[in-house]
Image: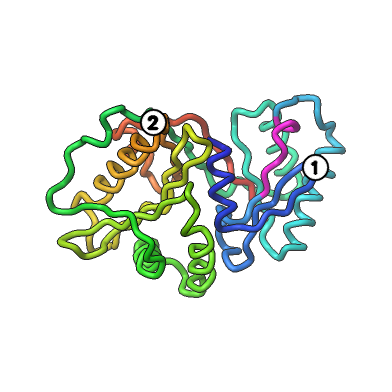
Amino acid sequence: MLLNERSFDGLFCDVSSSNRFDLYYNQRFSDDPVFNHAVIDDAILKSIDELDEESLHVLLYEVKSEAIRRNVPPTIFVERFWKISQRLEKGAIEDGYVIGGLMDILSKEVRADSDNLSKDQNNDAIETKDVGLWNEIFMRSYSINPAWESELIRRERLFSNDRNTVLFLAREKGEACGCLLLHKFPSDFVGIYCLGTLPEKRNRGIAKTLMMTAEGYAARSGSKYLTLQTVVRDGVTPMYEKMGFNVEFERDVLQLP
């Protein structure tokens, strides 16, 4: 699941790597931690004895320095299941970080008959290579800052032919009204991203159609699991749980004001 996320992040971000952390960053999206965050090396996170207190603060300083060098806000993603997570968070708070948010990471086992589920007769979803239209629906669905548009389109054009990444458009009476990005990596996982519906088209079954499309795609491609992320304060985790998803773990988003 983490590999899927990190692979997806690489579609929209550049990566600055060291032997202790990776910084995913994109200056054009600097106000969004999803596109600007550090991931501490797994070997450090797995070991309770990997870092003493002084080394921990040195690491946090290195993350802050690299983020500032890249002109993005210092942010660290910390999954709560790691052995060092509590000590890392305590050290970060001592250094001025705050917990800026909580994320749920969910998964669902793909049913073998997922591609045969009944669809809503009022709408459908199709795979698309029309990056311009997909991006328009994506931006309108999420009320995205217009300043992001040129960089979003540039990135989307770069990965539009990536065999592991597929764009879908939902349609109502033939008119595009929703969007979805699916990212298959590793082979057993399909990540659900950029699921959106135009504000004036919500509560009409369009998101459900897109989710069924995601599960059908996963079944056809031989994947075993769907995965997605939610921001807890958005209150959408219960909706996905009703669809059969389970919360696998939580993640704190540590931000330096």
Judged left or right of residue 125, residue 78 is right
Q: Secondary structure at mark 1?
A: loop
- Under circle 2, the secondary element is strand
- The location of residue 29, given as percent across then percent down, is 57, 64
Q: Nearer the viewer, residue 238 or 158?
A: 158
The quadrant of the image that shows the C terminus is bottom right
Amino acid of disc 1: Asn
Hey, what amino acid is under mark 2?
Lys
- Does residue 169 appear to the left or right of 157 in the view shown? left
Apparent side of residue 82 relative to residue 134 in the rendered image (left or right): right
Circle 1 residue: 19
Residues drawn in magenta: 38-45
Mark 1 neighbour density, 10 Å: few (under 14) some (14–19) many (20 or more): few
Q: Identify whether 251 is placed above or below 138.
A: above
Which residue is located at x 62 percent, y 56 percent?
A: 36
Number of numbered tags placed on the structure image: 2
